[in-house]
Amino acid sequence: MDAKMDAGFVNDLPALRGVQAGREYFVTMCPLKIVTNLLKVNDDDISPELKAQRVINKSRVPALSQYILDNRDSYLFSSLTASVDGDAEFSPISETTNGQKMGVLRVSMESKWLINDGQHRRAAIDLALKEDPSLGNESISIVIFIDRGLERSQQMFADLNRFAVRPTKSLGILYDHRDPVSKLCQDLTKEVKVFRGKVEKAKSTISNRSQKLFTLSGIYQATRRLLGIEEGAEVSPEGKQMVISFWNAVGKNMPDWVNAVKKEVSPKELRTDYVHAHGIALQALAIAGSALIATHPNDWEERIEKIKTIDWSRENSELWEGRAMIGGQINKSLNCQILTANVIKKHLNLPLDSREQEAEDKYAKGQSKK
């Protein structure tokens, strides 16, 4: 950095200084009302290659902004990362070891800024401030790199995103304490007998040798289907009790699931031999269950006992091929979920809705050509 800089026309940022890979970087805490102005980049001064990194998915911004507004007491945003091309100077507060790490970073107002990580967060902050200006005095941390000519920015963008891995759906549900359905599903793992000790909570798939029979994400999707609600929707106490009762009733009438809980049969064996040991069965049961409860609200628990007589064996290809299986392999596509649910609904003497009937007609037409 420059040893000296003109005292006028600069941004003075309180900062901490650190070193990575032999290069200095700085961390500052910036009020939200300043962020959008400080990190405003003139695209005319940015190369086409760097512009390509900065394309924002505009559909993501309103949801992020609403997340802030809906969770004023608990929202959380990680640091923004930015590169600065221009005159910059760090003045430590003292010459002591720790004092040299704290001070003021002075950045010329003529400098170019480029956001390497956090563009959607910045845009969401801007949108949220327009609705609630009181957010302006809250802050977010910015990690700043001095990058002459912004030559390193492309590599920085690649490096920052190279090892970024989204958590699995199951893990996201496990740690989500805001979504009422997520909280309900965590309760289900304790209150539904066949789920106890048999739910994979960290992964969204089950390995071949796993002793788990269900995934938390599978239970989540099936429970939303059963309730007929969108992600994040509230669940009434009556709805919660109905869900618990439904999955307990289903479990009671799936002898193989009960045997797996009793360790009389291994989940691996069930996955090899039966359709009901796969996620598609949970989804199909939820689709059929929702219709059953709506059609027979007073005696659905008695009627659901009939699922005990369904032949879930994968060897029964005449029933399951083209529905739960394609070429002998379990297929979890939406169409297959519907066709599998159709089997359950017919077994429970439930009518098909127009979408289900359309899928059934196409299936029958395809079978007639074979």
Image (cartoon, helix red, strand yellow):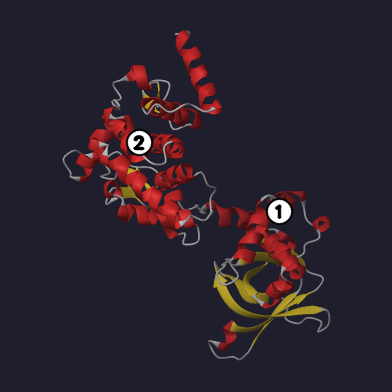
Q: CA distance from mark 2 to mark 1?
A: 41 Å
What type is the residue that disc 1 sits on? Arg
Q: Is residue 358 visible?
A: yes
The structure residue drawn at horizontal position 31% and vertical position 50%, both measured from the top left corner, is 192
Please state the horizontal and vertical placement of residue 129, each as a whole percent of the image.
72, 68
Q: In the orientation shown, which residue stands out farthest toward the front?
A: 298
**Circle nearer the viewer, 2 or 1:** 2
Q: Is residue 114 visible?
A: no
Q: In the orientation shown, which residue stands out farthest toward the top?
A: 369
Position of 321 compared to 235: left or right?
left
Please state the horizontal and vertical placement of residue 239, each as a whole percent of the image.
44, 51
> Dot 2: few (<14), some (14–19), or many (≥20) neighbours within 10 Å?
many
The structure residue drawn at horizontal position 25% and vertical position 45%, both measured from the top left corner, is 211
Q: Is residue 299 above or below residue 183?
A: above
The structure residue drawn at horizontal position 67% and vertical position 59%, both measured from the top left corner, is 119
Between 64 and 247, the one nearer to me in the picture: 247
Q: Say whether disc 2 or disc 1 marks the residue closer to the N-terminus.
A: 1
The structure residue drawn at horizontal position 31% and vertical position 31%, both measured from the top left corner, is 307
User: Which label was assigned to residue 278?
Assistant: 2
> Dot 1: few (<14), some (14–19), or many (≥20) neighbours within 10 Å?
some
Q: Is residue 223 above or below residue 305?
A: below
What type is the residue that disc 2 sits on? His
